[in-house]
Image (cartoon, rainbow, N blue to C red):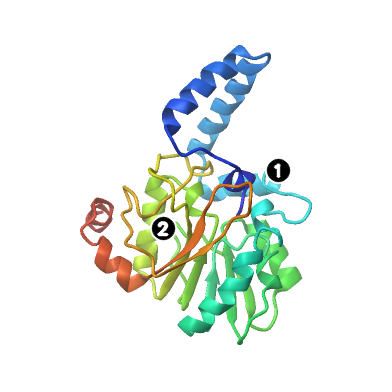
Amino acid sequence: MTSPSSTSPVSTSSATENSSIASRLLALLPGGREISRRRRKRKLLAEAKSAAEVFTDHYATNDWGDAESASGPGSTLEYTANIRRELPKLVQELGVKTILDAPCGDYNWFRAINWESEIEYLGGDIVAPLIERNYIRHAGENVNFRTLNIIEDPLPTADLWLCRDCLFHLSNADICRTLTNFLESGVTFLLTTTHHEATSNRDIVTGSFRLLNLERAPFFFPQPIHMMDDWIEGFPPRQLALWSREQLAEALRDTEWIRSAHAA
C-alpha cells in the first residue's frame, strides 16, 4: 500500500545524523517531548507486531488515505499518469499475459489503465479487509484478488510481478525474505520501486519508510533491464525498475543475504 511518506520530499544525506538532530530539536518545542514519546511508542508497537498487523492497522486508521485513494497520494490518477502510459507498452514488449500486483492496495489507479491486449490480473495484499472490499467492488473476468503476504507466502506464478510502493516500507531483513521468495517462485519478471538516486539504505522497522535503492548495499541488484519514472514534481525522484528472475538469481547468488537465506 502506498503512503504519504513514500511520496513526500525526503533528503537522502546523513539520514541517521539528521534524524538524531531532529529528535533533539523536537524535544525543545512545546509538546515536543510528548510527540517524541508517542513516536517511540509507535516504533515499539511496530516491532512487536507482525507485518499483517502493522499494515492492517495503517489501513484501519486511514493513515495513508486521501480523498481519492485509501492507498494514499501515490495511488492517485495524477501521480500514476506516467506509469499508466508506460506499463502497457512494457507489457506488450515483454509479451506479458499474467500480472501479479502485490501489494495491490485499493486498485484505484490500476483499473484506469488502457491495455493494448488482454491481461489476466491477480491483486494480492496482506490487508484482508482491503482484499475483501476489492473483491466485492472489482473482481470479474480476468480480474481477481487474494490475501497474500509477499514476505512469507509462496508467490503465484505470473509473467510479471508488480511490487510497487512496498519494499521501502519493509526492514532490510523482510526485504531479503521477500526477494528470496521471488527467486524461489515461478514469476518471470519483477517490476518494483527503487530510488535510483539514493546513496544508501538505512534499516527500518517494517511499516516505516525510507528511500530505497536496490542497487546499493546490502542488496546489490544489477543494472535493471528497464526503468520508468514514477514520481511527480515536488516529490523525490523514484522509478519502477525491471529485473528478470534469472538475472537476479545469477547476479545475487554470491551476496551475503542470499547465502544466509540458503543456509537457514
Q: Residue 103 carries which label?
A: none
Q: Residue at x 51, y 31 (%)?
A: 44
Type of residue at label 2? Thr
* Spot occupied by residue 64 in the image (x, y as percentages of width and height): 67, 47
Which mark sits nearer the N-terminus, 1 or 2?
1
Q: Residue at x 64, y 54 (%)?
A: 74
Q: Is mark 1 on a helix, strand or loop?
A: loop
Q: Crowding at label 2, few (<14), some or many (≥20) Cα neighbours within 10 Å?
A: many
Decide which of 108, 60 is in the foreground and name it. 108
Q: Is mark 2 on a helix, strand or loop?
A: helix
Q: Crowding at label 1, few (<14), some or many (≥20) Cα neighbours within 10 Å?
A: few
Give the image quarter of residue 179: bottom left
Which residue is label 2 attached to?
178
Which residue is label 1 attached to?
61
Can residue 264 be seen here?
A: yes
Type of residue at label 1? Thr
Single out the residue that lies furthest toward the right. 67
Can residue 96 be seen here?
A: no
* Spot occupied by residue 144 in the image (x, y as percentages of width and height): 63, 75
As drawn, is 185 to the left or to the right of 133? left
**Do residues under tags 1 and 2 come within 8 Å of each other at their CB atoms?**
no
Q: Which residue is drawn at 48% across and 85% down?
A: 95
Relative to residue 135, is residue 72 depicted above or below?
Answer: above
Relative to residue 115, is residue 106 depicted above or below?
Answer: above
Quadrant location of the C terminus? bottom left
Q: Residue at x 60, y 12 (%)?
A: 28
* Spot occupied by residue 169 in the image (x, y as percentages of width and height): 51, 47
